[in-house]
Image: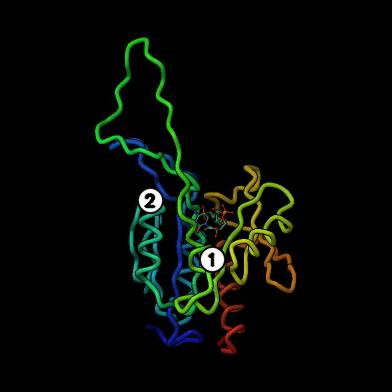
Amino acid sequence: AAPGPLAGMNALVTSGPTYEAIDPVRFIGNRSSGKQGHAIAAALAAAGASTTLVSGPTAEPDPAGCKVIHIESASEMLAAAQGALPADIAICAAAVADWRPAQLANQKMKKREGGEPPRIELATNPDILATLSAPGPQRPRLVIGFAAETERVAEFAQAKRRKKQCDWILANDVSPATGTFGGAENEVHFITASGAESWPRLTKRALATRLVDRIAQHFGKSVA
Ligand code: PMT
């Protein structure tokens, strides 16, 4: 790993969407591009952390200096994240599908002439952030989540932080007009147990650098 304020530390980042298969050719997905999570992984690696990035399907190139594990579904993301432990720092920026089709069709589902459209029953996916944040010997020392909200952003995000038991949460407004999903910029409320700070609108890269500076400060490491 590169020298830097986080040298000697292990970091884990999740990024991008998950795809939940319906049949061999169809899936349920979302509009996450991976830009935010990949920028964070790149910034952690540049700060010297040994960084594992668990990425859903994205068009983003693998960031320099990271070990990248490509997965598709939430279950695969969870298994890869747990396989990357122990870690000092975990950051969950992925837009994980909350549900998956309860049954996976082995063959492509066929349209029947005059038939009813299929009904897809859903099952709940595992929550990766909550699993990583649960108390136990494998819990990373610092677990950071994102909260994607469209209203009462800081308030709902603080509730999410408590429920999922992560240390910090970055709350972003994902209403369509903000362009947060897929765009180059993001604007977050930085939320800890002791309160919330509003950060200015930044490029996703600049936000990643600012977050990594905060992490270095938290661990008492000086930022060069
Ligand atoms: O990828 P980009 O186009 O750059 O967009 C970035 C982003 C908007 C996707 C990112 O900044 C973001 O907000 N990521 C979290 C999206 C999300 O799923 O938020 P949520 O509020 O539903 O989930 C809260 C937290 O729990 C997140 O840290 C999420 O990664 C995590 N989670 C959610 C569900 C689940 N099953 N497992 C999880 O780990």
Q: On the rendered structure, is 32 left or right of 108?
A: right
Task: Report the residue marked by disc 1.
Answer: 205
Horizontal and vertical percent position of residue 173: 66, 52
Q: For this rendering, which residue is in front, 185 or 15?
A: 15
Question: In the rendered structure, which amino acid carries the disc numbered 2?
Answer: Ser
Q: On the rendered structure, is 184 left or right of 18?
A: right
Q: Quadrant of the N terminus?
A: bottom left
Q: For this rendering, which residue is in front, 101 or 178?
A: 101
The quarter holding residue 162 reads: bottom right
Judged from this view, the residue extending furthest toward the left is 107
Please name which of the two marks, 2 or 1, marks the residue nearer to the observer.
2
The quarter holding residue 145 reads: bottom right
Q: Quadrant of the C terminus?
A: bottom right
Q: Residues within 10 Å of mark 1 (few under 14, many from 20)?
A: many
Task: Report the residue marked by disc 2.
Answer: 73
Residue at image location 63% in from the left, 61% down from the top: 163
Residue at image location 28% in from the left, 37% down from the top: 24
Horizontal and vertical percent position of residue 27: 38, 39
Question: In the rendered structure, which amino acid carries the disc numbered 1?
Answer: Arg
